[in-house]
Image (tube, grey):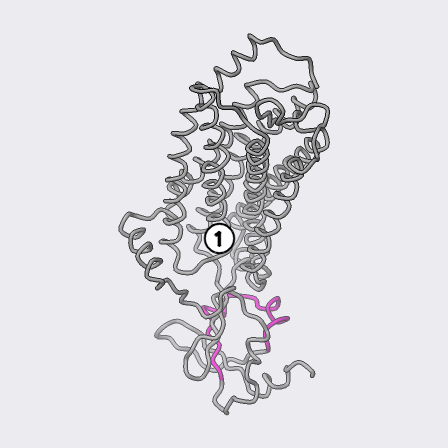
Amino acid sequence: MGAPRSTMSESTDEQSLNSNAVAWLICSGVSLLANTWGILSVSAKQKKWKPLEFLICTLAGTHILNVAIPITMYSVIQLRRQHSDYEWNEGLCKVFVSTFYTLTLVTCFSVTSLSYHRMWMVRWPVNYRLSNTKKQAVHTVMGIWMVSFILSTLPAVGWHDTTERFYAKDCRFIVTEIGLGFGVCFLLLISGSVVMGVVCIVITLFQTFTVHAGDNDNKNKFNVPTIVVEDAQGNRRSSIDGSEPLKTSLQITYLISGMVFIYDFLTGFPILVVSFASLKYDTSYSWMVLCFLWCSIVQSILLPLFLWACDRYRANVKSVWEKCVAIMSNDDTDEENNQDGAIHPESFYERPYEYNCTPEILTVDRIAKYDFSVLERGVPQVYPMREMHEDKMHYLQMLRQTRISKLPAK
């Protein structure tokens, strides 16, 4: 490790940490309440959960855990050390390091996942809606937590510098104090996540501006109609969401873009700089600890501000209260029968031997404007039947022979 510092320097560092402990606790409480309100607000404004909203709420939940466990733990222990002879021990320090780095990596990866999903939705809208994006979002979150937890738990089980252990005196959690191997892995993961997030959001913005600045043919190319498959009794069996309205699309794109850039430049890059400096000079200072903790708190307060600034996710007190009542009464059910919001070819073949001669109806909103050549790979051929002028919907009839002829071979 680096050269030992003087007792006076250590005393000054300790005073600077103690003077910030109360502020950390206050900001943590504000962040916890704000992120809880953000989750309830998003839930109250959405009748149907979508992958993007799921990822946003997951990010808010990560912030709640971050300020409730490691930040609060560090602040309380610093205050106790200031007013008594209480000290860090090995168990507490390992728990703090594991939870802090786990939640830091989860936050960074979640922001990158948001930018990736937005890029996918804007750049390849048909493929996005035909894919089981909800299931993929859940798998993404599970993978993020698994990778982050495994890497961040390794220092607690022995992957650290054994010459001077990070928990031997106080709790020195800067990466250089833990070990070179962990520090390099942490730097690579954070830097890769930041770069990927920026690249994805740049592609999203370029695609958005290109489409809206192009001609009508170019715009229709990236528009997807709303499709609803109903049976003979009018019961909805499957559906695919159409393209978002222009105002909504721009709001969400600007929201995710702002989140990615602010997160990366106010939190991602400072943490990278501090970690790299600590590894390069093989020492840690109190300002590095302050940077790590304040960056974590700032990023946890940013998300509720972004959600409040976006009209799509800004809910009033009445809506949030009604949502809470619905959750408590277990009466919050999804209106859609298909939870993934996509049409799968198998949905046309359920109960193949129970159909009568009455044709099924495929309802398509303004289908005449769109090119469905891409969709024909996963949807059986449909034939126009009649147009209803009253509701401006086109009804397409799927012939029974077509449905049976496309049954998968046994």
- Is residue 334 left or right of 52 when viewed as pictured? left
- The quadrant of the image that shows the C terminus is bottom right
Residue at left 37%, top 53%? 45
User: How dense is the environment of label 1, judged by Cα within 10 Å: few (below 14), some, or many (20 and up)?
Assistant: some
Residue at left 41%, top 80%? 234
Q: Residue 196 versus residue 182: which sits nearer the camera?
A: 182
Residue 329 falls within the magenta-colored stretch: no
x, y percentage for residue 286? Answer: 55, 18
Q: Which residue is mark 1?
A: 54
262 vs 148: above or below: above
Residue at left 52%, top 88%? 355
Q: Residue 385 versus residue 202: which sits nearer the camera?
A: 202
x, y percentage for residue 14? Answer: 51, 16
| Residue that extends furthest to the left in the rendered view of this protein | 318
| Residue that extends furthest to the front in the rendered view of this protein | 85
x, y percentage for residue 173? Answer: 60, 28
x, y percentage for residue 308? Answer: 37, 42
Q: How many marks?
A: 1
- The quadrant of the image that shows the N terminus is top right
Inspect the image, locate mark 1, and give the three-letter code of the amino acid beneath it. Phe
User: SS class of the residue under badge 1?
Assistant: helix
Residue at left 63%, top 24%? 168
Looking at the rendering, the stretch of residues picked out in magenta corresponds to: 360-380
Can you tell which quarter of the image residue 264 is in? top right
Q: Residue 113 versus residue 6: which sits nearer the camera?
A: 6
Q: Residue 198 versus residue 350: which sits nearer the camera?
A: 350
Residue 367 falls within the magenta-colored stretch: yes
- Is residue 248 left or right of 275 when viewed as pictured? left
